[in-house]
Amino acid sequence: MMASLFAGVSGLRNHQVRMNVVGDNIANVNTIGYKAGRTTFQEALVQTMRGASRPSSTSGGTNPLQLGLGMSVATIDNLFLQGGLETTGQVTDLGIQGTGFFVVSDGQQDFYTRAGAFGFDADSNMISLSTGYILQGKMADVDGTIPANSPIGNIVMPFGQQDPARETSEINLGMNLNSAATDSVATLVSAGNSNVIAVSGYAVNGSGGQHVITITGSNAQYSELSGIHANTLDDVVAGDVATVVGGGGTGTLPADDYVYTVIAQNSLGNSTGVEITVNAVPANGSVDLTVTYADPDVTSIQIYRRPAGGTYGGILGGKIYDGAYAAPGPLNFTDDGSQAGDGASPTTINTTLTLDSATQLSAIGVTDVSGFRLAVDGGTWVTLPALSLDSSVGDLISAINASAPGVTASLENGEINIKRDYAGAPSAYNIVLEDTGTSDVCAQVFGSAIFNVNNGAASTLQATDVFTPTDRTALAPEDLELIFDPINGIVTGISGLGGGGLTVQTASGGLVGDPDGVGPETSSTLIVDTDETQHATSIGVFDSQGGKHNLSITFTKSWLDNQWFWEASFTGTETIRSGGSGVVNFNPDGSLASFTYDGGASSLNVSPNNGAYDMDIDLLAGTAGTFDGLTGFAAASTAAARSQNGYGVGILSNISIDSSGLITGIFTNGVSRVLARIYLAEFNNPGGLLKTGRSIYQESANTGSAIMSIPAETTSSTITSGALEISNVDLAQEFTNMIVSQRGFQANARVITTSDQMLNELVNLKS
């Protein structure tokens, strides 16, 4: 009976232990980094009442007969399961995801914890806020490098520490310069006598500077000619009339000077004449006149006489001869004074018949229109069947214009003018009008049976451009192309200026050149300015004293494809000693070809003029043949100075902690530098750790030595900044364990009470 009593007592005692563990778990349900405990039981002493026997040939074996004497606590374990992370936003609150432990030290020995509520003490040590123990890790050197062989020790943040200035030695350039960019607006500076009235547009090559275009030669000329109708007489000139003065007694003329007017007239009344003065005719003298006028259309000659100081209506004045004449003569006439004169005066010396649109063809001598025809540019002959003898000059003009596209007939100064509407070489652009058979339209209206209009001329214009880029030397002369008007063949513009894109506008008549090409220089010289195409970027750089200087880099598009010039400048008193300009070239695929400095320099050397050392700066535009820096695509210009490696003096103002435990300092000068790294401890048997209170552990004989690991690198454990690991206690499980413990305690208590009643019954057997 006593065995059952002792078994029940052991059950009561050990279920109390389990209840204590449950209570501790529930008490620490909100303790950061807490790991729940677990109790396991084992059977206590066993009394063997009979051993086991072997089977025999006649009977089977028997099992041992044993009696248990209660139970005992087997283990009280810590369950190192991952707890959830609670975000706090505090950078020094750290939570571990994985199996590692933070290492903290009291200066004598190391302890381990999952409670990551850290902060700083008065000496800038990073400490556990609950214990004051210092967090362990490795400190970085002044360059932000953590030596591999440095010992693990206290993590100390140098708040208030100055970060010395660093001189800029490199600038990284990147992004794109537009290969098709152009801001090169054209401005007409001077047109000379070129007949250019405007230049507009953007130069395709995007290059700025001055274009001096020399224009030589002549523009194309139209084939154009006016007819001379057959009834228009040639002028009578003094050479057509010879005079001989006879001596006294050869006539009856009084002594005087005489004026003779000789008029030639055709069958339609057109006339032409000349006045001749004969001096010193003696008394009773005479004058012999010999007319040799050669125009075949002349039909008669009239001679008028007057004294040099008198009039045709006075004594001895008037017409003294009117007779038929056949060219070329001669007509011999002697004025011996016997012709008294009729007192008539010639109405005019020349009375030429002037054509108008109403003049009938028959009125000017046309007798047959049936065989009149014309051809344009050596093409098919075209006849004008609508014409008749009753047709007017206006009808003839209309018929020509309607029947011959590219030809314009018009009245010009009383004659019909024929014009080929497309200018050019007469061998290519001409008009032929002719009479065939008995037709006499061409002969009477235009003056000959075949009327050739072929006096045009091809263009001999040439335009030569000498371009002087801004702040650079003039380039070699370049011949430009001419633009011909497709309607009339006249040169009206120039193409290819600035690589194209510019429109040259001329006034009526087209481009005018210097015909002989020898001057003066301004006669047909065209001067056009184009703006530069530029893209600029700027960045602050630092000298050795931490002084900041604003550097601008301006890219200017070259006249060559895939090329830009660059130039550096400062806004202050800095002096660029060398390497302040250069050229950047790109390959056809847009990748960088080269980035060079002018003057053989290899870097940008600048004197800050403030007592600091000169700055020697490498401009890093990328790797040739790649796209890791500047590029030259046909896209928007976005080129920029992306970064530089200098900075001014700064003071540590803040820190950040990443998942690998790196603590990065953020300085007031914008520099970020690694200051330290937090290490985590790993154990082969974390369950063997000894609790020392305040959520910290220490090694035991069964944990193995701590394995110091780099988070996320030499261990899978990582650190989360701004979060704390909460307790991994599961309340549902703990409440269940509480009920189970309670039931176990109650059952063991019942064993004791029952055993007690049985003992009472045994004692009462005496009575």
Image (cartoon, rainbow, N blue to C red):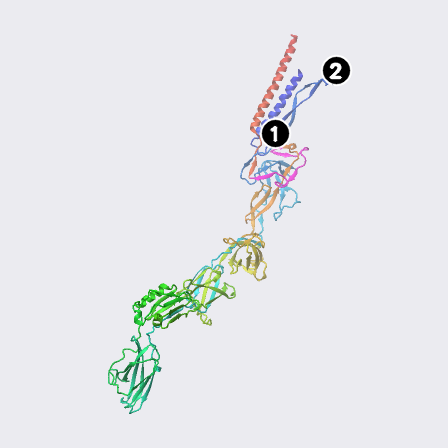
Query: Nearer the observer, disc 2 or disc 1?
Result: 2
On screen, residue 719 above or below 260:
above
Residue 742, horizontal then vertical, whole percent: 58, 22
In the rendering, which numbered label is found on residue 37? 1
Residue extending furthest front? Answer: 437
User: Magenta part of the protein: which range?
Assistant: 692-721
| Farthest-out residue, top | 767
Residue 577 within the segment the image draws in magenta: no
- The dominant secondary structure in magenta is loop
Quarter of the figure with residue 88:
top right
State the quadrant of the N terminus. top right
Q: Earlier in the sequence, mark 2 or mark 1?
A: 1
Q: 461 or 557, which lies in front?
A: 461
Residue 78 in view of the camera: yes
Position of 249 with respect to 698 (left or right) is left
Type of amino acid under label 2:
Thr
Residue 63 x/y as whole percent = 70, 18
Q: CA distance from mark 2 to mark 1?
A: 54 Å
Mark 2 = which residue? 58
Residue 704 included in the magenta stretch of the image: yes
Report the front residue among 347 and 745.
347
Residue 620 pos. (x, y %): 57, 54
Secondary structure beneath label 2: loop
The image quadrant where one finds the C terminus is top right
